[in-house]
Amino acid sequence: MPPVAHWGAKVLARRRSGRYAVLTVAAGGVADRCRAGHFASVSVAGQDSSMLLRRQVWIANSSASGRDGGALELVIDSAEPGGRRVAALEPGSVVDLMAPLGRPFSHPREPVGVVMVAGGGVAAAPLIRLAADLGARGCRVTFLAAAHPEPFGMLDAKRVSTATAVIQASWTSESPNSWRIGIPSTPNMSHTANIKVKPAVDQTRTGTRPRSVLGSVTARLKHSGHVIHG
C-alpha cells in the first residue's frame, strides 16, 4: 500500500454537482499514488469549531500534472454540518488532509463485462473512476445506482459506461410494504448500449428505501454470471 501523506492542501477550485460539492485541492507528490477506491480524511475543526472528528471523503479523480504538481478531486456531501463546513471552503483556503487511505480496487487481467452497483449518494464516486479505468482496458461496464439519496455523478457514469440505470423502487399492488425492482437481463453487455432495466416481476423485497433492494439486485446479477464491483 502507498504511504499516507498528511499536509495542508490548498483549495484550487470548487464546483457543485447536484447536492454535492467537488473540491479540487493541491496534492503535489501525492496525486500519482491515488487510485480508484482510495479516499481522504479531512479535518473540519477550526478555532471556532467543536467538530473534532475528521470526515472521510472519496477521491473522485487525481492528476499528477499541473502547476501545483498534482491535484485531487474530493466529493463532499453537505447533508451534515461537517460536510457543509468543508463544502463551503473557498478557493485559496487550506484544508488539513490525509491521503491516500483505503484499499484501491483490483482490475481484471483481461477485458470482461462488469456491473457496478452503487448504493446511492457519494458511494458512486469511486466506482465512476473505476468504470473509466476498466473501459480504457476494453471492459464493458454497466453502472447501477440507487435512486436515493441522489447518486453522485450519473452524467459522468453515463459517459464512461456502456450502459447506466438508476434503480427505482415503487410500490407493488401485492403489498404496500414491498418494492418492485429491475435488473439487466444478460451479463453480456456488448450489444446493449441502450440497455433498459428489465422489470423483475417475480422479485419483491420488503424495505423502506431503494438502497435496501441492492442486496437482492447484486445476488441476482451474480447468479446471472455478472462480475460485480460495489
Image (spheres, rainbow, N blue to C red):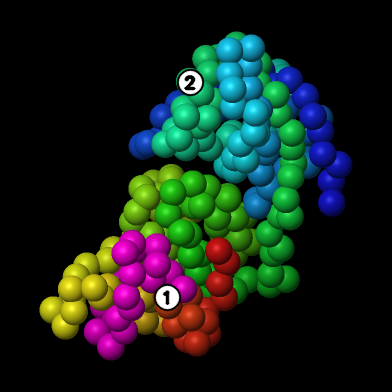
Q: Quadrant of the C terminus?
A: bottom right
The residue at the point 51 percent across, 23 percent down is 85
Q: Is residue 196 above or below residue 58?
A: below
Residue 225 drawn at (x, y percent) = 52, 85
Judge whether 19 appears above or below 201 on screen: above
Give the magenta part as a residue range.
188-215
Q: Which residue is mark 1?
A: 217
Q: Point out residue 125 in the picture as x, y percentages from the top left corner.
A: 52, 48
Expressed as whole percent of the image width and height from the top left, the position of residue 223 reads 50, 87
- Magenta-drawn stretch contains 211: yes
Q: Which residue is mark 2?
A: 88
Instruction: Examine the rendered structure and indicate whether residue 34 appears above or below residue 169.
Output: above
Magenta-drawn stretch contains 171:
no
* Badge 1 amino acid: Val
Q: Do callouts 2 and 1 mark residues in contact (Cβ within 8 Å)?
A: no
**Residue drawn at the location 63% of the way across and 22% of the way down:** 45
Using residue 96 as the reference point, say whether residue 77 is left or right of it.
left
Q: Is residue 47 visible?
A: yes
Q: Residues within 10 Å of mark 1 (few under 14, many from 20)?
A: many
Q: In the image, is residue 92 above or below residue 225?
A: above
Instruction: Tell me where residue 140 appears, x and y as whole percent.
Output: 52, 68
Residue reaching furthest to the front? 50
SS at circle 2: loop
Marks 2 and 1, the one that precedes in the sequence: 2
Question: Nearest the camera: 184 or 138?
Answer: 184
Residue sitting nearer the eye, 87 or 188:
87
Write the residue at 41% across / 59% down.
Answer: 145
Amino acid residing under circle 2 = Ala
Q: How many marks?
A: 2
Horizontal side of 103 relative to 131 (left or right) equals right
